[in-house]
Image (tube, rainbow, N blue to C red):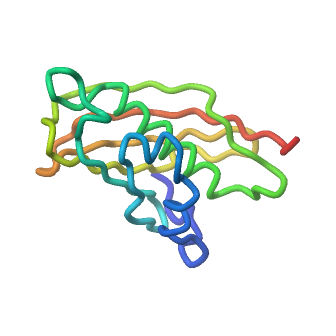
Amino acid sequence: MMANVFDTANISIDELNKRCENTMSTAIGLVFTEITPSALKATMQVNSSNCQPIRMLNGGASMAIVEILGSMAANLVIDRSKLVALGQSITGNHFRPVLEGDFVHAEAVAIHIGKKSHVWEVSIFQNEGKLVCKGTMGMAVVPVQ
């Protein structure tokens, strides 16, 4: 984990959530909750929009969390007037189920921040703090067209 990658004085959680209205984030119920100097955090209740027919968190929803947090985090640490960070690769491992009605909490931290690429790790936990999923998101940093 890299320390002090976010300028927390200039990033509003309310603005991040507003920016994500009517996107995948709102479709699955993901809400940004906190930004620290080294992590971006979010939470989501497992419900009918993000669970499997057996009423457990869908693995695809977990990977959507990895994508959303990794992408948002990468774009918060670059000059968006000149650059954009775009997803290049995503991997994930699922460790335990989460039942409908329960909440998951996710945290994105930087593994690598380079001029042309980033790697972000996103950990998803259930309410008791047990690891549900860990994913890695590779980002290409390219000039704005």
Q: Nearer the viewer, residue 117 or 66?
A: 66
State the quadrant of the C terminus.
top right
Q: Is residue 12 above or below residue 88?
A: below
Q: Position of residue 101 (x, y in %)?
A: 14, 44
Q: Please name the residue shown 61% across and 75% down the image.
A: 10
Direction from residue 102 to residue 134 in the image, left or right: right
Name the residue nearer the viewer: 86 or 118.
86
Q: Position of residue 55 (x, y in %)?
A: 15, 28
Quarter occupied by residue 114: top right
Residue drawn at point x = 56 percent, y = 78 percent: 9
Residue 86 location, quadrant: top right
Q: Position of residue 140 (x, y in %)?
A: 70, 35
**Residue drawn at 23 percent across, 36 percent down:** 132
Which residue is at the front of the view, 25 or 91? 25
Q: Is residue 143 above or below residue 56?
A: below
The outermost residue toward the right is 145
Res. 11 image quadrant: bottom right
88 relative to 104 in the view: left or right: right
Q: Position of residue 73 (x, y in %)?
A: 55, 52
What residue is shown at x 13% (from left), y 35% (from top)? 99
Q: Residue furthest bottom?
A: 9
